[in-house]
Image: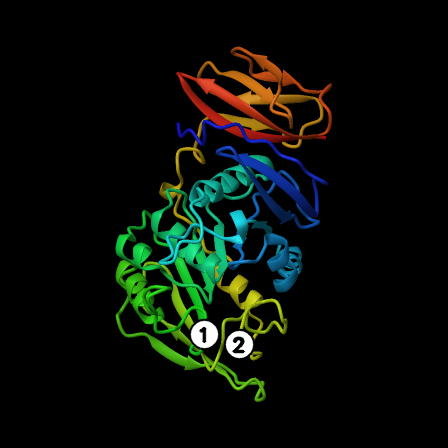
Amino acid sequence: MKIISAVFLTFCINTVSAQTNSSMNHNGINRTFVYYTPSSWNQSQQLPLLILLHGLTQTGAGVMDITGFNAIAEQNNFIVCYPDGINNAWNANMNVSVSTADDKGFIETLAHFFQSTYNTDPRKQYLCGFSNGGFMSHKMACESSECFAAIATVSGNMSDTTYANCNPQFSPAVLHIHGTVDAVVPYNGGAATGVSVDQAMQKWASFLNCVPTPLTVQMPNTNLVDLSSPERISYSSCNSPLELIKITGGGHQWPGISTLVGGAGTINMDFYSPQVIWDFLSGKSCPLNALNENSLSEIKIYPNPVADKLTIQSKQKTDFEIYDLTGTIVLKGEDQDEVNVKNLSSGIYQIVLRSNKNAQFLYFIKE
């Protein structure tokens, strides 16, 4: 059994549906995030999960407002989470250090939280990132033991360290969007940002066993005043889809989003990048044998949310401890398969399940 963390996680929430602000104590540091659950959500179905990583100096709530992914999640029935980096940055092994936080562990723990609390599908977990968040997405795909079926990055790339050490355990689908006149993360690479976009794409093409020479198709240039035009570069015969949208004349921006706070430089308005990103991510799935031990654990809890009695399903003797939002144990027991939680206050709780000296950390909602 995989032990997620030896550190207790606490949560503070405003609501348990729709848009929710929450926080988590991860490795002694308070980590905040906001997430959106579609109105159709119920515990009986496994929805996909998208984790969206903001750019340097930005916030999760800020990128949520800029991109409009909540509306796409509502229309397409998935959960989207917008975490915050420490000091508005992600530890993506950038050439110029911006953070030393355990962001890889934090993002993996977020995935486990949504699996256990909202029953998200561990085979349909996706990452998207802008700028520094894009670098973090590439790092996660290269290094994480958690399977993310696909990533999509905008104006972010691989750092030199990620490029040199990339050794993915899985075969994620990859979509990268980048402007050729991006002055923050240059298309052709640089000392501060790392390899070129073409080098990063060739790295993924090699790993995914693609035909080396891609097919280039011009996308509609519907807006003639934005002084930029996109083309879609697709690799064939890959283990997973690999695509690049190259925007000639495009800057460090989310295409299709006219905003002064999204980035820098020319904004291409020929397509709406969040919808194109979801269209690419949607339906991608990890193979069953790619799921980690936490996802396949024989220990399960249900129903979740729960009103009265929480069932612990395990083939082994399992002891439990339930913690409230302050980190105080509110219930504990030995070798029980049913726990009466009727008297607990409404909210999110952590349950620690122990068997054979191993521990599993799950979460449930008390109605």
Q: Residue at x 53, y 39 (%)?
A: 115
Q: How far across and how far down the image is residue 308, in percent? A: 70, 22
In the rendered image, the quadrant that contains the C terminus is top right
Q: How far across and how far down the image is residue 292, in percent? A: 39, 38
Which of these two is toward me, 107 or 159? 159
Q: Which residue is mark 2?
A: 265
Q: How far across and how far down the image is residue 187, in percent? A: 39, 73
Q: Residue at x 27, y 69 (%)?
A: 211
Three-letter amino acid code of the residue under disc 2: Gly
Q: How far across and how far down the image is residue 87, in percent? A: 53, 50
- Any part of residue 88 in sight: yes
Tell which circle, 1 or 2, labels the residue nearer the N-terminal end: 1
With 33 as the anchor, is 245 left or right in this view? left
Q: Does residue 42 sit above or below 244 in this rendering? A: above
Three-letter amino acid code of the residue under disc 1: Asp
With 53 as the anchor, is 142 left or right in this view? left
Q: Which residue is mark 1?
A: 182
